Image (cartoon, rainbow, N blue to C red):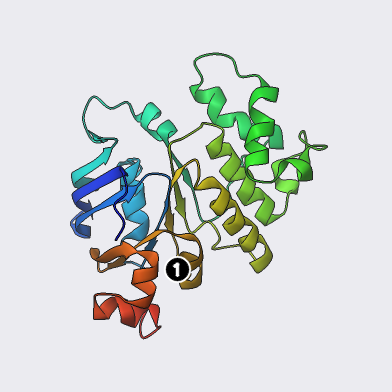
Amino acid sequence: MTTLVPKLRVEDLCAWYGERQILDRISFDVPAQRITAIIGPSGCGKSTFIRCINRMHELVSDARVQGQVQLDGEDVYDRHVALEQLRRRIGMVFQKANPFPMSIRDNVLAGLRLTAESPVRDDEAVEPALRSVALWDEVRDRLNHRAETLSVGQQQRLCIARALALQPEVLLMDEPCGSLDPIATARVEDLLGDLRERFTIVLVTHNMQQAARVSDRTGFFLGGQLVEFDDTDVIFTQPGDRRTEDYITGKFG
């Protein structure tokens, strides 16, 4: 297994909703400028895990977390960490495209307008963000149109552009292709290949083939625990745990 510089380090991470424990002592490193896939059956804690990384988990009133998530060596749960700055450094894209009810241009600028310390100039942010998701040529002549006029696949790429406009260091993606057709899914997967050169990406997916195609490292979650974490080609060809093999070959899940 190749040694890579960690961008994130997770140590003994546990998470609860009320009295129900969702994650149990998760520990592994997420390498910088690589794609790390998180796989596992429904209810195994995948989405909760990435929500803990940028502290969205605590938005639920009865949720709590124990353990550490370090970003460049700093614990994101330290009381001195500013949440606004943290969520700017760690962006998130959800399974269902959620463009805001406004224009394409304003969607890209929404996060910047909320967090920027100085006024944002449209021409300095909109085009680069849309180009980064291969959407600029498709929408350049209708930037003032409502985002809802885009196809579902285009809306998802717009949401990715909105996150990238903030220039995050880490991008969390929770089933970003879950509601897309095969053509739109292929566009997003091609996009991931380009983005891995600039960002650290953590990708939650139910799609085994997608994880095998796009990721560098893969972690298999089961029952709130990390069963195995390794290079993706190892996980899919020579897994070290029988439960991993059973899952990726479709015996359960």
The percent coordinates of residue 178 (x first, y second) are 54, 63
Q: Where does label 1 land, which residue?
A: 206
Q: Is residue 123 left or right of residue 174?
A: right
Residue at (54, 52) in percent of width and height = 192
Say what amino acid the circle numbered 1 marks: His
Placement of the N terminus among the 4 image quadrants: bottom left
- Depth check: give the residue in front, 17 or 231: 231
Please identify the quarter of the rendering in which residue 111 is found.
Answer: top right
Please identify the quarter of the rendering in which residue 91 is found.
Answer: top left
Q: Residue furthest bottom?
A: 251
Placement of the C terminus among the 4 image quadrants: bottom left
- Depth check: give the residue in front, 117 or 232: 232
Please identify the quarter of the rendering in which residue 128 is found.
Answer: top right
In this picture, is 34 found above or below 241?
above
Q: Is residue 178 left or right of residue 206?
A: right
Q: Residues within 10 Å of mark 1 (few under 14, many from 20)?
A: many
Q: Is residue 58 left or right of residue 125?
A: left
The percent coordinates of residue 239 (x first, y second) are 30, 75
Residue at (67, 31) in percent of width and height = 126
- Depth check: give the residue in front, 180 or 99: 180
Q: Is residue 197 left or right of residue 170?
A: right
Q: Secondary structure at mark 1?
A: loop
The percent coordinates of residue 189 (x first, y second) are 57, 58
Q: Is residue 103 visible?
A: no
- Depth check: give the residue in front, 61 or 234: 234
Q: Residue furthest top?
A: 118
Residue at (61, 39) in percent of width and height = 100
Q: Residue furthest right?
A: 141
The percent coordinates of residue 30 (x first, y second) are 32, 49
Q: Is residue 5 visible?
A: yes
Residue at (54, 37) in percent of width and height = 164
